[in-house]
Image (cartoon, rainbow, N blue to C red):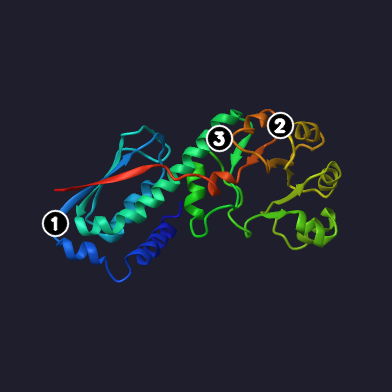
């Protein structure tokens, strides 16, 4: 994860929340009053957010001490003490909510991703995310997917070509769309094409797509069509796949399964904080 970008984002999140000052904490507590915030797990899960805790609190006061009892990717159980931050009470309270919100969400994504990887149970097929992330939180959410054992799809519109149905409609055909892209595309960027029919699959192969996505296709269709794909073309399945039917895609031969729900419909993990005056 880009630590410079994380620091910049956390600064903006704190500015949004604190504004001019934390009138409650600043009026109740003096600068010399010390305390600790303990992060407690209220359910089982996979932890993600160590850098958020360490960077976040130290942005507010570089004298805050952090004790981490877990690392990113570690499994924990309900009741575990995940981390402790010690320092001026007013500074701890300023950072508590922003830091906790992010850690809860990132841990929820990491936990969901780990569950998906285990349900699929196929070492030959990668679980990946999509661009269905929360605006402003993409770096953190995609990091959480990696923490849970998944892989990242493209980060945005800028780092990979994905030719979808609307592009094909406006361009006239898959072949035309790929040809137009290749005229100006650098050699380091892959071209992915989304297909829904066998005819589109054959056209994408003929047009030399780098990645072919089977969109909303059943496992039986993928198993049948994938035998037509030459070696060297990456295959991906996406659309209509959830935890209930994910295991059906095991051994289809597809290289990647991309799951939007890893980031857009997850539940933040239940983690609480307990404040102690020292």
Number of the label disc, if any, that sits on residue 253: 2
Q: Is residue 50 left or right of residue 229?
A: left
The residue that mark 3 highlights is 116
Secondary structure found at label 1: loop
Who's the residue at 60% across and 46% down the image?
A: 260
Q: Quadrant of residue 17?
A: bottom left
Label 1 with label 2: CB-CB less than 8 Å: no
The CA span between labels 1 and 2 is: 60 Å
Q: Residue 175's spot in the image, x, y percent? A: 84, 54
The residue that mark 1 highlights is 33
First in sequence: mark 3 or mark 2?
3
Q: Is residue 19 left or right of residue 158?
A: left
First in sequence: mark 3 or mark 1?
1
Who's the residue at 54% across and 40% down the image?
A: 150
| Of residues 5 and 120, the one drawn nearer to the viewer in this rendering | 120
Q: Residue 220's spot in the image, x, y percent? A: 76, 31
Q: Quadrant of residue 71?
A: top left
Q: Is residue 125 left or right of residue 43?
A: right
Mark 2 is surrounded, within 10 Å at the Cα level, by few (under 14), some (14 to 19) or many (20 or more) other residues, namely some
Mark 3 is surrounded, within 10 Å at the Cα level, by few (under 14), some (14 to 19) or many (20 or more) other residues, namely many
Secondary structure found at label 2: loop
The CA span between labels 3 and 1 is: 45 Å
| Of residues 271 and 198, the one drawn nearer to the viewer in this rendering | 271
First in sequence: mark 1 or mark 2?
1
Q: Quadrant of residue 236?
A: top right
């Amino acid at each position: 994860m880009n630590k410079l970008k994380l620091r910049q984002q956390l600064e903006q999140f704190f500015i949004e929340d604190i504004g001019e000052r934390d009138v409650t904490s600043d009026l109740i507590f003096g600068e010399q009053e010390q305390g600790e915030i303990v992060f407690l797990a209220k359910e089982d899960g996979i932890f993600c957010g160590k850098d958020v805790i360490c960077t976040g609190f130290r942005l507010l006061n570089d004298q805050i001490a952090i004790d981490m009892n877990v690392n990113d990717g570690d499994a924990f159980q309900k009741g575990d003490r995940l981390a402790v931050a010690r320092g001026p009470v007013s500074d701890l309270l300023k950072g508590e909510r922003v830091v906790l919100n992010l850690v809860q969400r990132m841990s929820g994504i990491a936990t969901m991703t780990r569950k998906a990887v285990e349900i699929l149970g196929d070492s030959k097929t990668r679980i990946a995310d999509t661009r269905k992330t929360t605006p402003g939180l993409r770096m953190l959410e995609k990091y959480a997917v990696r923490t849970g054992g998944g892989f990242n799809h493209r980060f945005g519109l800028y780092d990979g070509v994905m030719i979808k149905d609307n592009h094909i409609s406006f361009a006239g055909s898959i072949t035309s769309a790929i040809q137009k892209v290749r005229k100006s595309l650098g050699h380091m960027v892959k071209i992915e094409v989304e297909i829904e029919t066998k005819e589109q699959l054959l056209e994408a192969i003929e047009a030399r797509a780098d990645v072919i996505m089977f969109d909303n296709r059943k496992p039986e269709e993928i198993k049948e069509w994938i035998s037509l794909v030459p070696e060297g073309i990456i295959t991906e399945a996406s659309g209509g796949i959830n935890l209930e039917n994910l295991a059906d895609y095991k051994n289809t031969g597809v290289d990647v399964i991309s799951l939007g729900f890893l980031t857009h419909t997850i539940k933040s993990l239940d983690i609480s904080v307990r404040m102690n005056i020292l």
